[in-house]
Image (cartoon, rainbow, N blue to C red):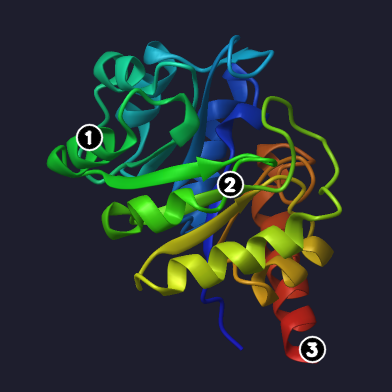
Amino acid sequence: MKKNFIISPSIMCSTPSDMEPYVRAFEDCGIDAIHFDVMDGHYVPNIMLGVRDYAALKRSTKIPVDIHLMCTDPEGFVQILNPAEGDWVSFHPETARNPHRLLIDLKRRGCKAGIALSPGVPVGYIDELGAYLDFILVMAVNPGFAGQKMLDDHLDKLRRVREAAGRFGGIEIIVDGNTTAQNSVAMLQNGATGLVIGTSSAMKFGPGKFAEEYNKYISEILRGLDEK
């Protein structure tokens, strides 16, 4: 069995000094996108990654950047960050002034446009916005901090997301949060087509060990999928 799912490592899980070594490791491993968390201290109780971080990342690699806007004003943050063509951008639709207009703006910029669904946020947003979505980021944990455990009802929500997205076709379903190899097998079996990975998987031992841990991680997932 070959890998047929998207992998997006979270650069938030690195220190500033480790960003460049991680990027080189990501390139060597053929990573699909680099997950980039923007937190404003309002929608989530944390502040992470801004304009300089994004600019530095764009200068250092051609890998697409997967921007996750955990912000109360996603329209404003899109204007500030000015995401590049080919990058992925997701936002939480309940925080947007006009989620439909924002998705159209992202597509006009040449970005892949997505929404992020936190726990407790209705899957029904997909019914209204599905025709404009390239991907959906499904949070397996409450957003804001790394190192949390997958919520008990996550797989049920993932199945409902898959059903709703299936009515539109071609929408990627990316899971963010506690994507251990064991959890990832279940996530992929229940509708996910991609995974955001961090300290619970291949990024737990630093950039020097990333390639080794990444290969082990992918092998373990493929073995688990094959067994089931």
User: Which label's residue is closer to the chain start, 2 or 3?
Assistant: 2
Q: CA distance from mark 2 to mark 1?
A: 19 Å
Residue 61: image location, x then y, percent: 35, 38
- 63 vs 44, nearest the viewer: 44
Residue 35: mark in rendering: none
Which residue corresponds to the image point at 80% horizontal and 62% vertical from the top-left?
A: 183
The C terminus: image quadrant: bottom right
Locate residue 67: give its quadrant: top left
Residues 154 and 49: in front is 154
Q: CA distance from mark 2 to mark 3?
A: 30 Å
Q: Relative to 118, say whether 144 is above or below.
A: above
| Label 1: which secondary element | helix
Residue under circle 1?
101
Q: Is residue 215 left or right of residue 28?
A: right
The mark tally for this picture is 3
Task: Inspect this view and state whether residue 200 appears.
Answer: yes
Q: Quadrant of the N terminus?
A: bottom right
Q: Label 3, on which residue? A: 228
2 or 1: tag closer to the N-terminus: 1
Pointer 1 local density, CA inside 10 Å: few below 14, some 14–19, many at least 20: few
Neighbour tally class for label 2: few under 14, some 14-19, many 20 plus, Cα within 10 Å: few
Mark 2 lies on residue: 122
Q: What's under tag 2, amino acid-wise?
A: Pro
Q: Residue at x 83, y 37 (%)?
A: 148
Quarter of the image where one finds residue 99: top left
Q: With respect to residue 204, does 72 lie above or below?
A: above
- Whether residue 193 is visible to the viewer of this picture, yes or no, is no
Above or below residue 95? Residue 66 is below
Residue 16, above or below 161: above
Q: Is label 3 or label 1 in front?
A: 1
Q: Is residue 8 left or right of residue 143?
A: left
**Amino acid tagged 3:** Lys
